[in-house]
Amino acid sequence: MRFLATTALVATAMTGMALAEGLPLKELPDIAERDYWVPDEVNAEGKLEAMQAVVGAEAVKFSGSQDAPIQIALIYPSSDTSDFWARNYLAMTKRLDQLGIQYETTEFASRQIEHSLQTTYANQVVLDKDIYDYVVFGPSELAIQGDNIAKLAAEKDDLTTYVWAFHTPLKDLAHQPAAWFDFSSAAGALTMCDYMIGRLGEGVTMAMNRGIPGITDNQRSGDFKACVEEKAGWTTVYEHYGEYQREGGFAGTSLILQSYPEATIIHNANTAMAMGSVEAQVSVGKEKDIFSTGWGGTGLELDAIRRGELDATPMRMGDDVGAATAEAIKADLEGRADELPFVFLGRITVAHDQMSADEIDALEQEAFRFSGVGALKR
């Protein structure tokens, strides 16, 4: 580690180890049916809310000292269309600037389908653990990357591991990371379900562009599908696995338009597929006939809503994850890691085409308070 020992690193490491070994803190009724824990099972009462309040407030300067910048490695699928990764990188670094923490970063980029490349990157960071103090890992898919998470987390004496974009710690990991940072896809799916039923009513026919089989898609797509079918009697005529890629969304939507014209809604499980979906619709002049959803409320999605191509999306207050990671680093440096929730969750609301321009702008300003409004330049 490249920061001073006065930051109680030994106590922090012991606290994190005790937390991981003591999980879950409580059990929900369906815990035996899952191979992962949900946030309410692993977060001590009040810690998430306290962290959310810190992230939403003005920065308070780091109280310690450094003999050199901390070194942060980032392994994530930032080469994909979604700007989630770039925005949270900006949010993290700008919050670190506000906190007065010196840092240097090294990025290891991939696409979301490049699972083996993330393994190569994880191995490289482990080999170079004497260089890095923190690693932020954004798995291509949680189950596939479980071994890599455990491998990085096992180096806790030299390396503090944070996981981005997942909030469901796998029970069977040999070693748990220090913390998880995400938005609840399950909560977002239910929020979106209630909005869609309220707006479109019962008995609707839909099709879906799903991502990659796994926890994220099970929640974003599966929980949404179950909710609208159970609560409002919707029918799902086709489910296409587009692997979270723009091309997958385009191909799936083209097939839906040709073979399932009865579907009036296309649900997309991420930004990339949503952009491919609306592109396919626009190419044949069908964008006004189909109700299209995205996921995440990224700048690209909000611009598509403004153009009338996308209709609604569960919108994350996107910069929360990056800002929370910076605050976690500060707490770790100050020997306060025991104050952190094991799983941090950002807020989600629905952005849609019936909002006024001012309402969308206000949501965007809050969500992207660090990374800036509008689509990021690629």
Image: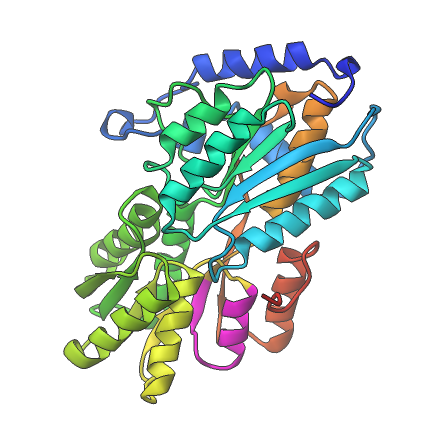
Direction from residue 165 to residue 49 in the image, left or right: right
Q: Can you give x and y, in whole percent of width and height, for residue 67 in the image?
A: 83, 24
Q: Can you give x and y, in whole percent of width and height, for residue 241 in the image?
A: 25, 58
Q: Is residue 3 above or below residue 296?
A: above
Q: Can you give x and y, in whole percent of width and height, for residue 128 in the image?
A: 58, 27
* Callout count: 0
Q: Is residue 359 above or below residue 339?
A: below
- Out of 116 and 35, give the one closest to the viewer: 116
Where the C terminus falls, by quadrant? Answer: bottom right
Q: Could you say which quadrant of the image residue 194 lies in? A: bottom left
Q: Is residue 122 above or below residue 95?
A: above
Is residue 342 highlighted in magenta?
no
Q: Could you say which quadrant of the image residue 374 lies in? A: bottom right
Direction from residue 257 to residue 335 in the image, left or right: right
Q: Can you give x and y, in whole percent of width and height, for residue 125 in the image?
A: 54, 31
Direction from residue 371 to residue 220 in the image, left or right: left
Q: How is the image coloured?
A: rainbow
Residue 114, can we see it?
A: yes
Which residue: 68% across, 33% down?
A: 71
Q: Could you say which quadrant of the image residue 375 lies in? A: bottom right
Range of residues picked out in magenta: 299-313
Direction from residue 66 to residue 352 in the image, left or right: left
- Out of 75 and 228, give the one closest to the viewer: 75
Which residue: 44% across, 32% down?
A: 39
Where the N terminus falls, by quadrant? Answer: top right
Q: Is residue 191 above or below residue 134?
A: below
